[in-house]
Amino acid sequence: MVGEVVFDILDDDLIIAFFMATDSYFYHYLFIGIFVLFAFLFPLLPIVLARFVAPKKPSAIKNATYECGLEAEGDSWIQFRIQYYVFALLFVIFDVETVFIYPWAVAFKSMEISALVEMLIFVAILAMGLVWAWKKNILEWE
């Protein structure tokens, strides 16, 4: 008897009306939930499908290291100098700098003097990083 009462209270139309009412707390988060669901499913679906659909015929030739159609010489594990990674990081840092400076320059006329001071501090910090890289000879490419 108690189960029947609970079932009558939780009628399907009542549940849908509760979650879909535009003034409901859950209604506002419904779209975020759907977005998060698709954000997980969209990349996972091709991976799962490829796992089941892809042909699986491993062989020694397929597992060999490929170098432009030529047979590989030596071990495929090669250590690179850290200088290449630091150079790439410096590029990213100064590339991001322009992303921050460009909108600031567009809106410069409508800003106060404090915005100029803040940008000068920002550019000074980046200049110190450039001077540091220059002194460490990181910008020298060999």
Image (cartoon, helix red, strand yellow):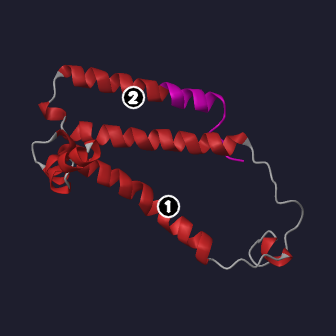
> What's the residue type where badge 2 is placed?
Val
Secondary structure type for disc 2: helix
Residue 12 lies left or right of residue 59; in this view the side is left
> In the image, is residue 18 above or below residue 43?
above
Location of the N terminus by quadrant is top left
Residue 36: x %, y % from top left: 36, 51
Residue 23: x %, y % from top left: 9, 42
**Callout 1 touching callout 2 (CB < 8 Å):** no
Rendering quarter of residue 124: top left
Rendering quarter of residue 64: bottom right
Residue range of the region highlighted in magenta in the rendering = 128-142
> In the image, is residue 121 above or below residue 54?
above
Residue 86 lies left or right of residue 115; in this view the side is right
The dot on residue 44 is 1
Secondary structure type for disc 1: helix
Report which residue position mark 2 lands on.
123
Residue 128: x %, y % from top left: 50, 24
- How many numbered dots are placed on residues in this image? 2
Q: Answer with mark 1 or mark 2, whichever residue precedes in sequence.
A: 1
Residue drawn at point x = 18 percent, y = 37 percent: 107
Residue 66 lies left or right of residue 53; in this view the side is right
| Residue count near mark 1 (Cα–Cα under 10 Å), binned few <14, some 14–19, many ≥20 | few
| Residue count near mark 2 (Cα–Cα under 10 Å), binned few <14, some 14–19, many ≥20 | some
> In the image, is residue 32 above or below residue 121?
below
Residue drawn at point x = 25 percent, y = 25 percent: 116
Instruction: Let me know if residue 73 is in the magenta part.
Output: no
Instruction: Let me know if residue 139 is in the magenta part.
Output: yes
- Foreground residue among 140 and 31: 31
Rendering quarter of residue 140: top right
- Foreground residue among 52 and 140: 52
